[in-house]
Image: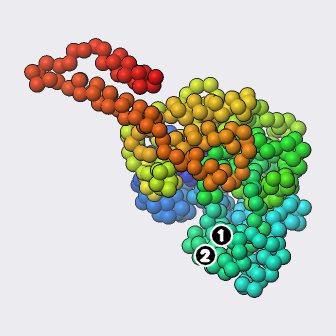
C-alpha cells in the first residue's frame, strides 16, 4: 500500500502531484537543488531533501541522489512527473531494484517506446498507421537516397532517441539531404548521446493530435479522448485544447482504438499518451508515445472528470481501473495556455529574474497550475515555464472568451512573459475559427508579432507611476510630519480606472 511518495521533480508539476497525494492522505516528499531551496514545492511537501547543485545534471538528473533521498525518507514510491527522469529506463529499473515503486511503466516499455524506430515497428505489427519511411536507422547516404526516392520529398530526418524537436531536420530538396542528415545526427548525439536517425515522409500542414490512455495491470486499457496540440513553436507546444476542432465522432472512435492498440502492443501500465499526425484529409499516422504524464493533462482532467495523477497512483498500487471506455465522455471545452518567462520580442529568449508582483486570474472555470510567488527568483537552470492557465466552459466560443478574460487579469512584473503573445493568439481569426495546423504561428507571424499598441504598455507604466507616487506620499516629510491623507488608495484606484477608460 502506497503511503508515502517522493516526487522526483520541481515547480508546478511537483506541486500538482503533491496536491493529489494530499487528497489521498498520502505523504509527499520533495527534492530540491541549490537553486530551488525557496521553491514552492519544497514548502508544500511534508518533507524535503537536498539533492545537489543547481544544474539539473548534478541534481534532478542524478539517479543516485534521488534514490538516496527516497531511502532516507523511507518512501513507498517515486513519481517522476514529466521531463528529467520521467522517461529514463535506467531510473525505472533502479527503482525496481531498490524495492521502490516507480509510478509509471516498466523499464522495458520505456526503452521500446523511447526508441522511435522500435516504436514504429511495434505499431506496424499492431496495425497502427505510421508515416511512410524506413524501419531501421540510416547507415549510409546511399540508403537515405533510396528511401527518399521511395517515399518522395519533402522528408523529415528524426533522431531515434529524440524528443522536444531536437535532432530533427526538414529536407525539401535532394541536394540538402546529406547536410540534413549530418546536422540531425550531430544534434542527436549532443542531446541524447545517440546519433541514430531515420527518415519519414513529411506530412504537409499536419495537425498534432494526442490521445490520453490509462492501462492497469489486469489487461484493461482505455482512452480519455483527444487533445489538440497543433499550436507549436519550434516543435514545442504553446496552447492545447480539447475537444479538437478537427475531430469527428467517427475519427475519434478510430483513433482512440488505435491508441489503445498502441498501448496494448507493449503491455502498457499507467498513464501515457499516444501522439498522431493528421493531414487535411483526416488521414492519421502514429508519431510517438510518451510514457509519462503530459504537461497538458489538466485539460483532459477538466473535460473528462478524471484525476490522472490519482489514477497513476492507484494503478501503481495494483488497483483495477474503475472506469470503462463506455463511461468516458467529454463535457464542455477546455483550453490550456503555457505561461513562460521569456521575451517574445527577442526570439522568445528565456527571461529569468525576480518576480516583483503577480496577480493570478480567478473566477468561474479558471484553473491555475503554477509555482512562483512575489519575491521568488526564477532560476536560469531550468525550463522557463511559470505556470499553466487552464480554462473550461460549456462551449469553445465561451472558453476562448474566458481565456481572454483570464489572460487580461494575469499580471506579472519583474520578468518578461508570453502573456501578451498568448492574448494575440486568442484573437487570431484562424484560432477563433478552429482552422489551424502546426504552421499556425509562422502563418500568422505578422499578426502575432506586431508591436503592442501604446494603450496597453502605457497603461501599465501609468499604473506603476501612480503606485510609486502613492508610496512616495507615505514617506515622512522633511518637517517630520507624516502624510495623514486617508484617500491614497482611492486616488490610486481612480487613476487606474481612468487609465482603463
Q: Is residue 201 something one can see in this rendering?
A: yes
**Which residue is found at the position 46% from the left and 22% from the top?**
501
Is tag 1's residue or tag 2's residue first in the polypeptide sequence?
1
Determine the image quadrant of residue 102.
bottom right
Image coords of residue 264 (percent x, y) = 84, 56
Q: Is residue 485 left or right of residue 13?
A: left
The residue lying furthest to the left in this view is 479
- Name the residue beneath numbered marker 1: 169
In the image, residue 112 above or below residue 222: below
Image coords of residue 406 (percent x, y) = 56, 32
Which of the numbered marks, if any, corresponds to residue 480? none
Which of the numbered marks, if any, corresponds to residue 183? 2
Q: Give 335 or 345, whichever is nearer the viewer.
A: 345
Q: Is residue 423 left or right of residue 317?
A: left
Q: Is residue 495 left or right of residue 101?
A: left
**SS for tag 1?**
strand
The quadrant of the rendering that contains the N terminus is top right
In the image, residue 75 above or below residue 372: below
**Badge 2: residue crowd in 10 Å (few <14, some 14–19, many ≥20):** some
How far apart, in angstroms, are the residues tagged by discs 1 and 2? 8 Å
**Badge 1: residue crowd in 10 Å (few <14, some 14–19, many ≥20):** many
**Which residue is found at the position 50% from the left and 34% from the top?**
410
Total numbered badges shown on the rendered structure: 2
Q: Is residue 118 something one can see in this rendering?
A: no
Residues marked 1 and 2 touching at CB (< 8 Å):
yes
In the image, residue 199 above or below residue 450: below
What's the coloring here? rainbow
Amino acid at each position: 500500500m502506497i503511503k508515502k511518495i517522493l516526487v522526483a521533480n520541481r515547480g508546478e508539476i511537483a506541486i500538482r502531484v503533491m496536491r493529489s497525494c494530499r487528497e489521498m492522505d498520502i505523504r509527499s516528499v520533495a527534492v530540491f537543488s541549490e537553486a530551488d531551496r525557496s521553491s514552492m514545492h519544497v514548502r508544500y511537501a511534508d518533507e524535503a531533501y537536498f539533492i545537489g547543485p543547481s544544474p539539473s545534471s548534478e541534481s534532478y538528473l542524478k539517479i543516485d541522489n534521488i534514490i538516496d533521498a527516497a531511502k532516507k525518507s523511507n518512501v513507498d514510491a517515486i513519481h517522476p512527473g514529466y521531463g528529467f527522469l520521467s522517461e529514463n529506463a535506467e531510473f525505472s529499473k533502479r527503482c525496481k531494484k531498490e524495492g521502490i515503486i516507480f509510478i509509471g511503466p516498466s523499464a522495458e516499455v520505456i526503452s521500446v517506446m523511447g526508441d522511435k524506430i522500435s516504436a514504429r515497428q511495434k505499431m506496424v505489427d499492431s496495425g497502427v498507421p505510421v508515416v511512410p519511411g524506413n524501419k531501421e536507422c540510416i547507415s549510409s547516404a546511399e540508403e537515405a537516397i533510396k528511401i527518399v526516392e521511395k517515399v518522395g520529398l519533402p522528408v523529415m530526418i528524426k533522431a531515434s532517441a529524440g524528443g522536444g524537436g531536437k535532432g530533427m531536420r526538414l529536407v525539401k530538396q535532394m541536394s540538402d539531404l546529406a547536410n540534413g542528415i549530418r546536422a540531425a545526427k550531430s544534434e542527436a548525439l549532443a542531446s541524447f548521446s545517440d546519433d541514430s536517425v531515420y527518415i519519414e515522409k513529411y506530412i504537409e500542414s499536419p495537425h498534432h493530435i494526442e490521445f490520453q490512455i490509462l492501462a492497469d495491470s489486469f489487461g484493461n486499457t482505455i482512452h480519455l479522448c483527444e487533445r489538440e496540440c497543433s499550436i507549436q513553436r519550434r516543435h514545442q507546444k504553446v496552447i492545447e485544447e480539447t475537444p479538437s476542432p478537427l475531430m469527428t465522432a467517427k475519427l475519434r472512435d478510430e483513433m482512440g482504438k488505435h491508441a489503445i492498440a498502441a498501448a496494448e502492443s507493449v503491455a502498457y501500465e499507467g498513464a501515457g499518451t499516444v501522439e498522431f499526425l493528421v493531414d487535411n484529409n483526416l488521414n492519421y499516422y502514429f508519431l510517438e508515445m510518451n510514457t509519462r504524464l503530459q504537461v497538458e493533462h489538466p485539460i483532459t482532467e477538466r473535460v473528462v472528470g478524471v484525476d490522472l495523477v490519482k489514477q497513476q497512483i492507484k494503478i501503481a498500487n495494483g488497483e483495477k481501473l474503475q472506469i470503462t471506455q463506455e463511461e468516458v465522455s467529454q463535457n464542455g471545452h477546455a483550453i490550456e495556455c503555457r505561461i513562460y518567462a521569456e521575451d517574445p520580442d527577442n526570439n522568445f529568449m528565456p527571461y529569468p529574474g525576480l518576480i516583483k508582483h503577480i496577480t493570478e486570474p480567478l473566477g468561474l472555470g479558471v484553473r491555475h497550475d503554477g509555482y512562483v510567488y512575489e519575491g521568488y527568483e526564477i532560476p536560469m537552470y531550468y525550463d522557463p515555464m511559470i505556470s499553466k492557465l487552464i480554462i473550461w466552459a460549456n462551449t469553445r466560443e465561451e472558453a476562448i472568451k474566458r481565456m481572454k478574460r483570464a489572460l487580461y487579469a494575469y499580471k506579472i512584473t519583474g520578468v518578461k512573459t508570453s502573456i501578451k503573445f498568448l492574448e494575440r493568439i486568442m484573437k487570431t481569426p484562424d484560432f477563433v475559427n478552429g482552422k489551424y495546423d502546426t504552421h499556425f504561428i509562422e502563418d500568422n507571424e505578422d499578426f502575432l508579432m506586431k508591436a503592442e499598441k501604446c494603450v496597453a504598455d502605457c497603461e501599465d507604466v501609468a499604473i506603476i507611476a501612480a503606485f510609486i507616487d502613492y508610496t512616495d506620499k507615505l514617506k515622512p516629510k522633511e518637517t517630520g510630519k507624516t502624510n495623514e491623507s486617508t484617500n491614497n488608495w482611492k486616488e490610486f484606484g481612480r487613476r487606474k480606472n481612468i487609465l482603463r477608460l
